[in-house]
Amino acid sequence: MKKKVYIISHSHWDREWYIPFERHHMLLVELIDDLLEIFASDPDFNSFHLDGQTILLDDYLQVRPEKKEALQQAITDGKLHIGPFYILQDDFLISSESNVRNMLIGMEESKKWGSPVKLGYFPDTFGNMGQAPQMMQKAGLEAAAFGRGVKPIGFDNQVLEAETYSSPYSEMKWKGPDQSEIFGLLFANWYSNGNEIPAEKEAAIKFWDQKLADVEQFASTDHLLFMNGCDHQPVQKDVTKAIALANELYPDYEFIHSNFTDYLAAVQNDLPEDIGTVEGELTSQETDGWYTLANTSSARVYLKQWNTRVQRQLENIAEPLASMAYDITGKYPHDTLDYAWKTLMQNHPHDSICGCSIDDVHRGMISRFERANEVGRYVAEESVNALKTEMNTKIFPEDSFPFVVFNTNGLAKSGEAVIDVELERKTFAEGSPASLYRDLAAKEAGSYHVVDENGRVIPAQISAEAVHYDYDLPKDGFRVPHMKRYVTIRLTLRDLAAFSWQSFALVPGTAPIEQDGLANADGTVLENDLVKVEIAENGTLAITDKENQTTVDGLLNFEDTGDIANEYIYKQPEGDQAILSSDTKATVELLENHAEKAVVKLTHSIDIPVSADDLLDEEQQMVIEFRARKAGRSQETAPLTIETTVALAKNSKKVDLETTLDNQMKDHRLRVLFPTGLKVEAHEADSIYEVVKRPNTVSASWKNPTNPQHQHAFANLHDDIRGVTVGNYGLNEYEIVDSETIAVTLLRCVREMGDWGYFPTPEAQCLGEHTFNYSVEVHGAPETRYETYKHAYTAQVPFTVAQVPVQEGKLPVTKQFVEVTGNTFVPTALKRRKHDKALVLRGYNMDENEQELVLEKAEETPVLLNLLEEPMDETYTTKLAGYEIRTVGFVND
Ligand SMILES: [Zn+2]
């Protein structure tokens, strides 16, 4: 039997990276023009793989709309292979839902043209998420291809027995935490191992002798894969000639121009018995640790914060509200939401969200975030307006000002709701703006309190009355500018049910309020029934958990070090000593203190070097790899002022932290440290549909002195008695230092892109003002950590509020839209299915154990769906498996 050589032509298309989007865009137009020509002129040219992402079709048609038919013909004829994804994402830096929408929208787009290639495609992704096997299967994909995460070692190597993330073969099985298993294909010699195949005899022999040996070192079967292309590679126009020549030169091999569909069928049919299995996330655990590229999670942190904001707006605010409003309007804005999602996902490719491109690219991303966010806000507002018109508030007194608070989270939420309640308005038709303003401002101030629907007084902070300008945009008329007199209400709510709303009203008259505050007079102690927070002179926090009588101290310590590498990788200069805020004194100021909440402000001023020394510039110009650099930090220092508010609410163990600073220093990394005093072997972090367990120590081959990791909402260390959870908002990088400290990166400031040349990126220094939100919460026995995880999740999604007149309506003032009962189930989506508007609820099990999960919506029946929202073969059950990702559709009985 001859060995069979499959040559797949492709081009890995980073839409933006070391050159701006539009330059790459124009090159893409050239590429597809060339392809359409070659499809017509070379009958031996089998096909071209369009990099697994459908957005390239839209990009091309934007410039060449007249080529739509030719493109359709090429796809129909099987010449151009498309899909299954919309873009090639970074798995870890986008949300769980974003990973799903990339498949959902990618498949929908593919089906408009034909059928997608059934291969999860992650050629360049910087590591692979552990739940990918389950996610691929639930999107109808039984195989995934990837270029990183697993170290290929060749089957003549004897040491691999002990290693879990190495593979003798380029082919393997990949198993997720829930035991789902798919076929994994590693580009062991990269996705360019068949690039630029010579069509001239002498060069061809040199090429193939080497390349065949390289492939055979890892291939488990006689089906050998060659990827004919590379990053932005133009199509090789004489590839079929080069293949004909190879067939002449190597009679023991059969060389064919092929495609993934044919290759996958052949290779999977012939896999040997001893094919290996890799499990869970693949993050290059068994390499030297330098090129995991995990530090992209701290490059340009402002992008990650923006991404979190827009994801929460679409997933957790706009879609749940629109789903609720559907019951009133019978309409769901699918087109609008698709537009918002596509705009957001244009920021999700690995070179984009990772922050590892040139400045121009990342400036463009801000505009996309803003646009997607505005669309999300519009959908949310329209939905609230629809719900509001039907809210029956007759239960409140005629002279009251009712308002409704929505918890759009899939988990019960505690926290503060903030709303401006309008007391009176005067439109510009009634007088000059200035006179209206003066009239309203001159009114005698009233006194108010807040009640719930049963007339019970609810503790609230109510501001003094104020006047400001506003306007209405009626649906059936011209804009209405006006002045309004209003108060701002801050309401501390406890355990507002998942996917629910509750109404309150501002009513005239004073009500007795509890006098005692949670803080002491100078603000150095904050205390409630559950915890006591003591602030040391150096600004670190000691938190005592009253329930189990344990204290953790030294929390909230800022650490600054130099960074002489690039957007991809952090490298501390040799001999650089970390500068710690705990070596200085902090000032404490009491900002707010009442029975519901206390807030203090800590101010640190630490002297840090203003930049790296002059050698760094020279070393970068010379393209010296970061490990060989001798640059240090400059001798000149300047003070960095760090202001942090520390907030504790009644009945909460969570301490909320908000840090603001104006960064004027370059070439450094700023982290906040939470030493836990625990010495444990592993920790947990929020990943993609997974609370992932990661070891606190590195593999034997690891050389990098640091071990940066990705997170979404939290990281946790715990033992059998107690634990600490550090929550965050858009701070995706953390590290477990010395097995006991959770270090969260706030800023990483570098001056070059890195990778294959010299690309200066002054804006990656992140100069200017920044605000960081995070939290720390202590807990007791291990099972109680899940409560802290839920707190970290719900902290990311604010309550939505709206004022409602006293009126009749068909909606009750308080309602839970869907009931969710399950201890460790975390909903990630509440939306409507496209074709029939059925309600879709998706979430995952944080725990490894099976549990009971009850999801109920009145008069509707739950059915199990896959990630593409199609019915699954399995019948509905309330048993949720360990680590299961579950999508449920509600259909009318
Ligand atoms: Zn790439």
Image (cartoon, rainbow, N blue to C red):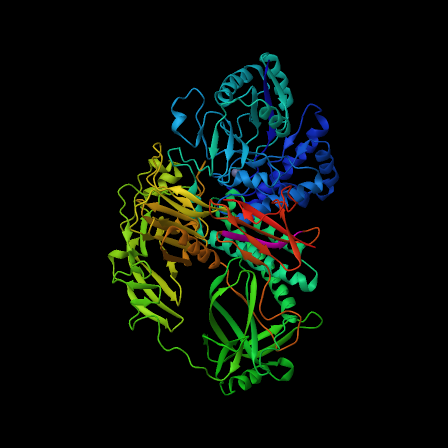
Q: Is 458 on the left or on the right of 474, as rendered?
A: left
> Does residue 107 sit above or below 862 in this rendering?
above
- Please indicate, yes or no, whether residue 95 appears anywhere in the rendered image: no
Compared across the picture, whether 550 is left or right of 390 comes to left
The magenta segment is 825-833
Quadrant for residue 398, please give it.
bottom right
Q: Indicate yes or no whether the magenta region holds residue 751.
A: no
Residue 364 pos. (x, y %): 54, 51
Q: Position of residue 305 (x, y in %)?
A: 47, 54
**Residue closer to the observer: 320 or 69:** 320
| Residue appearing at x 55%, y 47% in the figure | 879
Q: 517 or 347, which lies in front?
A: 517
Q: Is residue 827 magenta?
A: yes
- Residue at image x 70%, y 29%? 39
Q: Is residue 513 visible?
A: yes
Image quarter of the N terminus? top right
Query: How many numbered callouts?
Result: 0
Residue 188 pos. (x, y %): 49, 28
Q: In x, y percent, where is residue 411?
A: 51, 58
